[in-house]
Amino acid sequence: MNDLHVKKINRNLVYGWMLIVLILFVSYTLEVVKGQRSMSYLFIFMLVTAVPAIIVLILYLKKPDRYSLRYTIVSGYFIMYIFVMITGSTTMVFSYILPMLSLLVLYHQPIIILVTGICATVLNIISIFLRYSRGEITTENSKDIEIQLALLFLCFLGSYLATRIYDEIHKTNEKYNKELTERNRDIERMTMQTITTIANTIDAKDEYTRGHSKRVAEYSATIARELGMSDVEVTNIRIIGLLHDIGKIGIPDSVLNKPGKLTNEEYQIMKGHTTAGAEILKDIDMIPGLEIGAKYHHERIDGKGYPDGISGDEIPYLARIIAVADAYDAMSSNRVYRRHLPQEKILDELEKGCGTQWDAEITNVMMRLIREDRLPKVNPDAETELVQQTSTILSRVIDIAEDRGGDNKDELDELTSTYGRDRGKAAIQNSIAKNGTGCLLIFDIDHFHKINDIEGFIAGDIYLKKVVEQIRNLAENQIISRFGADGFVVYFSEVSDAAEAEKLAEIFLERIKNLAKTDSRVSRISVSIGITEVVTEKDKVMFLYENANKALYVAKQNGGNTYYCHRPVDYNSEELSDPAADLKKLVEIIQNREHYKGGLVAAYPEFGKMYEFISSLAERNEMQVQIALFTVSQIKGAKASLDEQDRVMELLQKAVVNSIRNVDVITKYSSTQYAILLMNLSLTEVENVINRIMTEFLRTYDKNEFSVHYDTADLSKN
């Protein structure tokens, strides 16, 4: 039985006994008032009753978990019981034992109940014999005595059996709790071993950071303890520190161990380990805020950190502790790009960054620990053999997975050292969320397939490298992502508006023209550019990409080696009230394009070709050509996934295909739009077709997360 349980039972017994004494005192006081008892009797009774109770109370207060207190309580209670039995004149004295019995059951000790029962029975028999000898009990009035003795026996027997059962249950529970506690300790040990293994595996990816995570964890725990945090908080921050760099599991070794200066794209990848780590840990609730250390340990007090650029008290306190510990270990350890700094230099750097880069209070604590030589000495070789072997196995598994996934589109493009598509999307989205402004441009090499066919793939590689080289020279703070064989999506965070982006495009195209004249290796080079502007930090990269892609489509139609800008809707202008803005732009593009000649390289070439065919046919036969644009949009307040959006687009496509004729044409205009060419239909017939499409769509769409809007226009040539 643990101390807490003993303390709880002792409290119940002592307070229960005090309550019985109080009730008896009130009862006998009333008898004194009625003249049934004398004051001397009451005084002696309280002396015999209250003194043992007070003694027991004092013993309890001095040591609440005293195991032997139960025996003192029983002895004191029996003193009271004997006195009442000797002096009492009522047979109800027999029942005084019952409250005590109910309390004794709490101890679930059958031996106490047995001894108490035997003693009480013996005392009652003696009392009955004495009363019988005095003539107070006769055969005529002995019925009540017999009943009370029977009840007394039954109460003790019931209490004894209940105590036996209670004791068995208690012992079973105690055994189970002990096993559960041991199991929990084993789980905790296994959890810590697993976390340490993961930390070792992360560190193993960088040959110069062996033991880094464990050192940061121990430094963080030491700082936390120095700051007066509780043992639980210290344990938590140790675990958070162990996992603060878990996002590096996805950083390519070529970037992690690069000896020279990282390119902008490589640096963006390296910075991504914070958000990647937070994403890995976000749903794990074992430790509150486990993802905090991973996400925010590179934020700065002055707001110049990453990934979110938050400042001061906005940075979680735990992350501020880990940031200081991480910085100290980075400065005091050998790295791929430099040797460790001497202690005096580290203190100077901490002093410089105190209050600007790092939290002032935490930094001062770290400097005090350094000066007093109180930081723990962490030996990475001190891990158990099991942890070391598991770390080695996990590292090999990851290495093999990375070797097999060498062509993963998430890695840097080997030819141009730019982002792959998915990693580029993530990096651009993070930067948009942080900056809230900028422009997105698509650079697409015209007729690139022809270049590969005519000049060969090696020559094509030179074209790609030259384009990237010219893009890099355009502006600072750019993110370049290779989205396809011949196209690059580039986000310029410091290009404030579309007009400035157009100037960059003009400069770029002028350089490309000069390059074609001066470098015979790329004499055929020609690039089309689509431009769009970031409106708010909430803009989604793929939405911007669709807009830039539409602009690229126009640039391609204009003959290539030019640019076009998709300008955002001005929400303060009257254009907002025109729901057909996209359709008007599409009609303008179609009607102003040159007639189709030869091979057309564009985002939607089939649409252009089919329009040219239908337009010529309609012109010869004096038929009308109508265009309808269907747009899927998310309902305000709804929280739908991209997968759900794709499903809605599929349902809309099926509804259109099932509703139009064989001579009509449908094409996907963007990720959320379908355009339809309808030939030789009256306005009423067009309306009927659209009604069929909407009816079919609404019949199959069963949620309330997206709505479909449509607009129509007449493309007939006069």
Image (cartoon, rainbow, N blue to C red):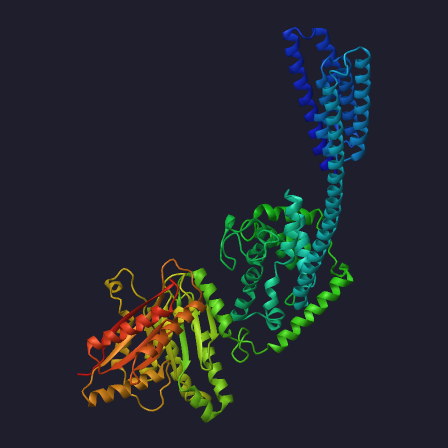
Quadrant containing the N terminus is top right
In this picture, is 63 found above or below 699?
A: above
Q: How many marks?
A: 0
- Given the current orientation, which residue lies at the most extreme bottom position? 454
Residue in the foreground of this view, choosing between 282 and 169:
169
Could you say which is closer to the camera, residue 90 or residue 439? 90
Q: Is residue 628 above or below residue 241?
A: below
Residue 670, x across and y down, in percent: 37, 74
In the figure, is residue 328 to the left or right of 497?
Answer: right
The quarter in which the C terminus is drawn is bottom left
Return the residue nearer the eye: 563 or 262: 563
Point 29% across, 63% down: residue: 570
The image quadrant that residue 147 belongs to is top right
Residue 680 image position (x, y, % from top left): 22, 83
Residue 431: x %, y % from top left: 46, 64
Vertical comparison of 375 with 420: above or below: above
Residue 212 higher or lower than 711, as above or below:
above
Is residue 669 something one can see in this rendering?
no
Can residue 691 be seen here?
yes
